[in-house]
Image (cartoon, rainbow, N blue to C red):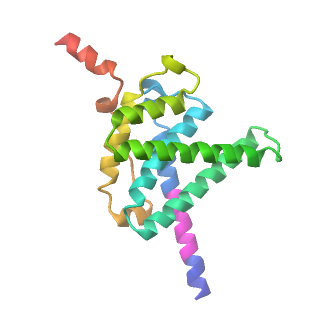
Amino acid sequence: MIFSLFQRKKSNRQVIERQYELITNAARRPVFYASMDVPDTVMGRFEMISVHLILYLRASNKAGETAARIAQEIVDAFFEDVDHSIRELGIGDTSVPKRMKKFSHMFYGRAKSYEEAIAAGDADALAAALGRNIHPEAGDARPAMTALARYMVETNGILAEVSAAEFEAGRVTFPDAGPDTGPDTHNAENSRKA
């Protein structure tokens, strides 16, 4: 009996690690940084992992109790990763809890605003929230973020079709962020050629 408990925990750990790797790999795709106005910085990477994790959480909550439990463990792994990264940057041990609290507020604030916009089917509100979060200092000069908002809406629809079994196996993948979700200038260039 105890042996089977350890086997199950080991199996869950493998599922969590596999799924977390799929999420982080999706977030690291160059297209986000080259074509969708996400800065290729530590904070830009945090933003993109948050985007993919939030989309994953939204879909997993509809995939059953086991999927939701695994999703929570993936969130925990994400925050362990953030903690480790903060320490690697040389932040002192006494400052880490304060920074972690800030990152936690940032993540859950983003989750709330993105969830509300996606649930309402409001791509403009989603793009505005992305702009505020990814480019907080830019003010009125911030990019529109419509391409990333479109990618999120499309990905949300795709993840809604993923089976509970795929969530439970840690095999949920994300679609490519190809030309259909590329920068808005793509359509303008094609119009000029016609």
x and y percentages locating residue 157 in the rendered image? 30, 48
Image side of residue 108 versus residue 66, left or right: right
* Front position in the image: 102 or 158: 102
Quadrant of the rendered image containing residue 9: bottom right
Quadrant of the rendered image containing residue 185: top left
Is residue 15 part of the magenta span, yes or no?
yes
Magenta span: 8-18
Image side of residue 96 versus residue 140, left or right: right
Q: Quadrant of the N terminus?
A: bottom right
* 6 shown above or below 137: below
Q: From this viewpoint, is residue 175 visible?
A: no
Q: Residue at x 56, y 36 (%)?
A: 45
Q: Quadrant of the C terminus?
A: top left
Q: Residue at x 41, y 59 (%)?
A: 60
Is residue 99 part of the magenta span, yes or no?
no
Majority secondary structure of the magenta segment? helix
Task: Tell how many labels.
Answer: 0
Q: From this viewpoint, is residue 136 visible?
A: yes
* Front position in the image: 66 or 140: 140
x and y percentages locating residue 51 in the rendered image? 47, 42
x and y percentages locating residue 147 in the rendered image? 37, 29
x and y percentages locating residue 40 in the rendered image? 55, 28
Q: Residue at x 48, y 56 (%)?
A: 19
